[in-house]
Image: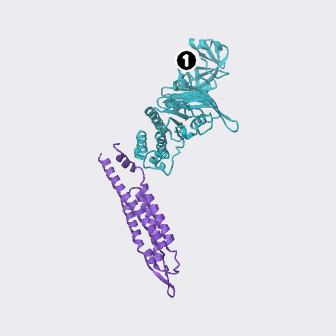
Amino acid sequence: MASLSLKNLNKIYDNNVQAVFDFNIDIEDGELIVLVGPSGCGKSTTLRMVAGLEDISSGTLIIDGKDVTQMPPKDRDIAMVFQNYALYAHMTVYENMAFSLTLLHEDPNVIHEKVMAAAEILGLTDQLNKKPKQLSGGQRQRVAMGRAIVRTPKVFLFDEPLSNLDAKLRGATRREILLLHKRLKATMLYVTHDQTEALTLADRIVCMSMGYVQQIGTPLELYDTPANVFVASFIGLPPMNFFTATVCGDHLMIDGQIKVPLTDEESTLLSSYNNKEITLGVRPENIVKGSDVTINVNNCENLGQTTLIHGHLNGHKVTAKFREWCNYGYGEDITVSFNRKHFFDKETTNAIR
Amino acid sequence: MANITDIKTDRMRYTKNKISANLSYLAIVFNAIYFISIYSSDAKNYYYNIEIGVSVIYNLLFMLFVFLASEGVKNYDKTFSIVLCAIGAMQIVRIFGIPLNAYMTFIELKKNQYLHVMEAGQFLLCVACLVISAACAITGGVIGIIKSKKLREYEKTLVSE
């Protein structure tokens, strides 16, 4: 396995559309990095640049200390797993997994040992004589991963590998990928638009928007201390609630009517914003029963252990997540408190720290 | 995995018997060459009898059965391997049919003017094609029998484990 370094990577297409702006990251050997962001944010383009499937407009790509920016894909020693599996339909699982090594003219006995070892890891031993069409989506994706494993590449690239699977299978396959990573201790670069995948899989997450890196950090860092409004809104499910509020010393005023008290620490943090507008962010799980503000309930979604309460706070949509079974009726008022708040500069959208 | 022999045998569980299958295809190819070359003759209507019909039908059946057998041997089927050997042996027998008869036969074109139905060169080509076709089929069949036996025995040990 190897370390990976992306330095000032840019991608400008022939029509002058820039898809990626100054992408910088140093990935340690054995790290699992997840690129996350909405469609069109440049995450797949970045991955394809690493794979060599897209030319790098400017910048440097270093794999294991070696500059591979101009190197053709076949020489980069990278394995990529695609969303649509890209398996050969006329070949069996065994042949699919062995194919890349056969092309390299490896000894068939060595190939066999590698394929069997990969099949064992992925639980495909009983499926080796089957054709891809006889397999479920999850099994096909495991075959695609097996094909990558047998090559023992320096870096694994995953391009939304779970997007074609149903929710249940996605969860199971996600856990398999995680186990695989623990077992192989491989350097992996994983692209997804699903923040659950990002949070559960990643050692570090790269959150992207409009071709720019918004924040790089551990899942907890992104969840707990988002760098800006975009990251705060993208990470976390249900998404964070946002309100425009004015700082008034020891409290915030929403719409000049709703008073949200601040702790001493929060007041100190916002002292330079006194009488200025900021963006207040509150995660649904940080809204608890209390006495500070009143929410007018629209509807409740009971999820078993938790209940999502959708309502309005002085006309602003708000979602709260209570850790109990609740049955509030339409139009009912409930009083709540915000036990954790996030503050963002209204102009720059950056977090106030 | 214990040793290289075990790995080779274990590999057979997931790979096809391509050698036997390819030899079968080769047998078909040489049979086709034989069939193309045999009826070229100056002895006008020598071949215009029931033999030509039988020969055509046999060649079609040969190609069909060898192709079917090739699919069988590819999957280590012992029965198809035996069938392939038998078809290969029949190719040798065929040498003593039309080719030898034609080679041994002279027909009178005009008075005291005789013509070989099949010249030596053509005869040798036909014999060579049939011999190669037979060799390919028999070798493919024998390899198939050996491999299928080996695989069955190995599978038995796996079951007993």
Residue found at x 53% / y 36%:
A157
Q: Quadrant of the N terminus of chain B?
A: top left
The chain ID associated with circle 1 is A
**Residue shown at the point (51%, 88%) measured from the top left:** B111
Q: In the image shown, does A16 or A179 lie closer to the viewer?
A: A16
Q: Give the residue type that dot 1 points to.
A: Ser
Residue A68, given in percent of the width and then of the height, sits at 57, 34
Task: Confirm whether residue A298 shows in the render.
Answer: no
Query: Which residue is at 51% across, 70% downward?
Result: B36
Task: Name the spot of residue B109 as percent of width and height, x first.
Answer: 52, 84
Task: Decide: few, some or many residues near mark 1? Use Cα within 10 Å; few <14, some 14-19, many ≥20.
Answer: few
Q: Quadrant of residue A116?
A: top left
User: Chain B rendered in what hue?
Assistant: purple
Residue B64 drawn at (x, y percent): 46, 65
Does residue A84 appear left or right of residue B138 in this picture?
Answer: right
Q: Position of residue B120 (x, y in %)?
A: 47, 74
Colour cyan maps to chain: A
Q: Quadrant of the C terminus of chain B?
A: top left
Q: Is residue B11 visible?
A: yes
Residue B151 drawn above or below residue A46? below
Disc 1 secondary structure class: strand
> In the image, is residue A16 above or below residue B14?
above
Which residue, given by chain and number where applicable, does mark 1 sit on? A291
The colour scheme used to paint the residues is by chain
